[in-house]
Image (cartoon, grey):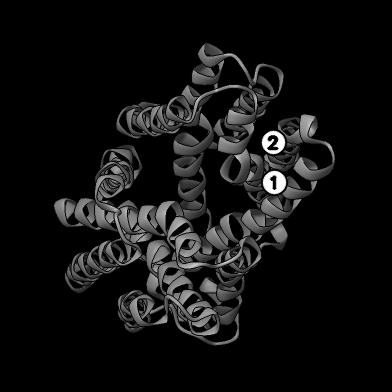
Amino acid sequence: MAVLIASFYFFYFALIGVHIIFVPKILSEVGYSPIEIGIIFASAPLVRFAIPFLFLKGLQLSPKTFFTALTLMALSAIGFYSALEHFWPLLIVNILFGIGIALILPYIEVIALEQIGRERYGRIRMFGSLGFIAVSLILVRFLTTPYIGIDFLIAMAVATLVFGALVGSRHRSSSPSDCGSTDDICLFSIRNHIPLWIGFFLMQVSFGPFYNFFTIYTTAHGISLDTTVWLWSFGVIAEILMFYFQGPLLRGNLVRLLQITAFITALRWMIVALFPDSTPLLFASQSLHAFSFALFHTTAITILFELYRARRLAQQFFFGISYGLGGFVGAIGAGALYQYTPSFLFIGGAVTALGAALAFKMGKRSRY
């Protein structure tokens, strides 16, 4: 099972890599305006935020839902081919694609934690990082026409479908994560742990400047594009190393670990803000991606796995509130900061990460 889960992570995040790294460039080459590209890609985090609420209205997070999401993801990826040069069909296809990928990962995350445990989870999850960086290094050499990029998108989607289906068909859960939404033991609420969820939201908001403007910001301060690409790659390498070696760190106080990773994230953004033209310090800041993403992510999903009986629903809300709503607000906020006060772009990220650390500290008395 571990090999199947690792293979799923590899192709799923390779698929994500094609979508977020190359599809915007493909759309630009086809002739879409920046505003149109922004609208198309803003739909994904909003969909990710909205989906978890459907489960509170009766939708069952069942194997049937999972396999339906896999099929929807693959079919919508194929739909990119015919919709590529037409805005409204492409927007609809991208929304359907967003629905599919938003439903798939939380389901697999629970299976991974059930099957391999928190200490070995990182060594399996790192294959996702390897897939992400591998497809970026390979596709950049072959992307001579827009449709070659779409071919890669379809190929990664089909591979994700295959390995996702294999994992889902072989998994038989005996944990409470499969209980029905009407069962009292599975009633889900964020009200008793509001500081925790605020912290998740703020952590992802703080990444808005990085995910949306890091390349623009560094090159504007004299860092070459080639060096900036290596900075991105160095961060992924640090992430992979943390996933591999993080097991012993997860034996301690998980709430304190969330606080530490949030403080380190604030330090990371301050380094970028204060030394945007220093290559050594920018590489140092990228090394902290090991803590602000890899260790934080594993700690967060582990806490939710242990805190909630409705485990898959908890993971859905984690991705929806953090990567969905937090990603959307972070992108909008970063855009406003960069347009009106560009020198405060990463200072804003640092302040938001400190807010996340404070939220985790305030929630410390909750029984996590």
Vertical arrangement, residue 358 with respect to residue 138, above or below: above
Q: Is residue 282 left or right of residue 348?
A: left
Question: Given the image, on which type of amino acid does mark 2 rest?
Answer: Ala
Residue located at (46% from left, 35% from top):
295
The reply to whether dot 2 and dot 1 touch (C-beta < 8 Å) is: yes
Vertical arrangement, residue 10 with respect to residue 293, above or below: below
Q: Is residue 313 left or right of residue 141?
A: right
Q: Position of residue 72 (x, y in %)?
A: 36, 81
**Quadrant in which the N terminus is drawn:** bottom left
Residue 327 is drawn in which quadrant?
bottom right
| Residue 252 in view | no
Residue located at (65% from left, 45% from top):
208
Front-lying residue, 277 or 105: 277
Mark 2 or mark 1: name the one nearer the start of the chain: 1
Front-lying residue, 115 or 243: 243
| Disc on res. 202 | 1
| Disc on res. 58 | none
Residue occupying the far right of the picture: 340
Front-lying residue, 173 or 124: 124
| Disc on res. 353 | 2
Q: Position of residue 269 (x, y in %)?
A: 65, 28
| Residue 40 in view | yes
In what element is the residue under mark 1? helix
Label 2 neighbour load within 10 Å: few <14, some 14-19, many 20+: many
Q: Position of residue 263 (x, y in %)?
A: 65, 27
